[in-house]
Image: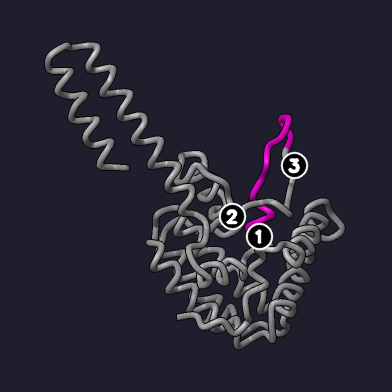
């Protein structure tokens, strides 16, 4: 497809040299078409490409679906049963200024993270450093570990790390998650328990988190359908 756009662009520039303004308008139209195609392709690429990426998504799925919003009749309407599974959770357009600012704001508060270095240091602290070692309960461990893969997904969406680096680092955390919990149920329920405490249950947000948790067990495409001991290589 990109070869076609390149050919059209070359033809348009040749026409521009002969006709002036009409050809220039054609060049502009071809450029817009090519950019639109690239953005659509990037949006499609946000879906997990394989079971490894889907398994990783499962570790932060509650957060991802909670933060993926549908707008209907100018109102935000959660639809957790049909919300697409996308790396980083949020709908596209991929890497748009709005999406980038959304993730930057999220890292600023409450994380106080403002760079790739700070993000990776936080992941290390929570997965194999003092942040993880000081945990006393499974709920605390789930809260630390699952937010590590969440942060790595955000780093990918911001362009701070490549997709392959996100997968590699997430697999390292995922192996710790597999060793820490007996299965999806223990992990997801432990995470939810700590999340509800953080959201000061009862609250509307806490109710939505419960709804996400329930939907994840009912969806045919749920990552929870994958084996818990899936080889993360």
Q: Is residue 122 above or below residue 183?
A: above
Asked if disc 1 and disc 2 are in contact, CB closer than 8 Å, the reply is yes
In the depicted structure, whether residue 208 falls above or below residue 19:
below
- Give left or right: position of 131 versus 157: right
Q: Which residues are magenta?
A: 63-75
**Residue at 53% of width from left, 50% of height from top?**
103
| Dot 3 and dot 2 residues touching (CB under 8 Å) | no
Q: Is residue 74 magenta?
A: yes
Q: Residues within 10 Å of mark 2 (few under 14, many from 20)?
A: many
- How far separated are the C-alphas under marks 3 and 2? 15 Å
Q: Please determine whether, in this image, residue 94 is positioned above or below residue 33.
A: below
Label 1, on which residue?
63
Question: What is the secondary structure assignment of the residue under circle 2?
Answer: loop
Residue assigned mark 2: 89
Numbered circle sitting on residue 145 = none
Q: Position of residue 187 (x, y in %)?
A: 70, 77
Identify residue for label 3.
77
Of marks 3 and 1, the one in the foreground: 3
Q: Position of residue 102 (x, y in %)?
A: 55, 46
Front-lying residue, 197 or 65: 65
Where disc 3 sits, the SS reads loop
């Amino acid at each position: 497809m990109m070869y076609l756009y390149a050919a059209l662009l070359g033809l348009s520039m040749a026409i521009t040299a002969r006709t002036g303004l009409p050809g220039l308008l054609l060049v502009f139209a071809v450029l817009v078409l090519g950019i639109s195609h690239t953005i659509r392709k990037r949006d499609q690429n946000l879906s997990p490409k394989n079971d490894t990426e889907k398994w990783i998504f499962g570790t932060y799925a509650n957060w991802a679906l909670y933060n993926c919003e549908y707008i209907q009749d100018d109102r935000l309407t959660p639809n957790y049963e049909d919300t697409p599974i996308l790396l980083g959770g949020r709908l596209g357009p991929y890497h748009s200024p709005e999406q980038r600012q959304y993730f930057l704001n999220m890292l600023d508060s409450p994380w106080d993270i403002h760079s790739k270095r700070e993000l990776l240091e936080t992941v290390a602290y929570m997965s194999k450093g003092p942040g993880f070692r000081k945990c006393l309960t499974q709920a605390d461990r789930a809260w630390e570990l699952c937010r590590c893969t969440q942060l790595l997904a955000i780093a990918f969406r911001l362009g701070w790390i490549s997709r392959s680096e996100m997968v590699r680092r997430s697999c390292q955390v995922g192996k710790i998650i597999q060793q820490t919990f007996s299965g999806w149920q223990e992990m997801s329920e432990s995470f939810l328990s700590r999340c509800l405490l953080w959201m000061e249950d009862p609250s509307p947000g806490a109710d939505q988190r419960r709804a996400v948790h329930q939907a994840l067990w009912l969806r045919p495409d749920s990552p929870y359908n994958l084996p818990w001991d899936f080889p993360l290589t």
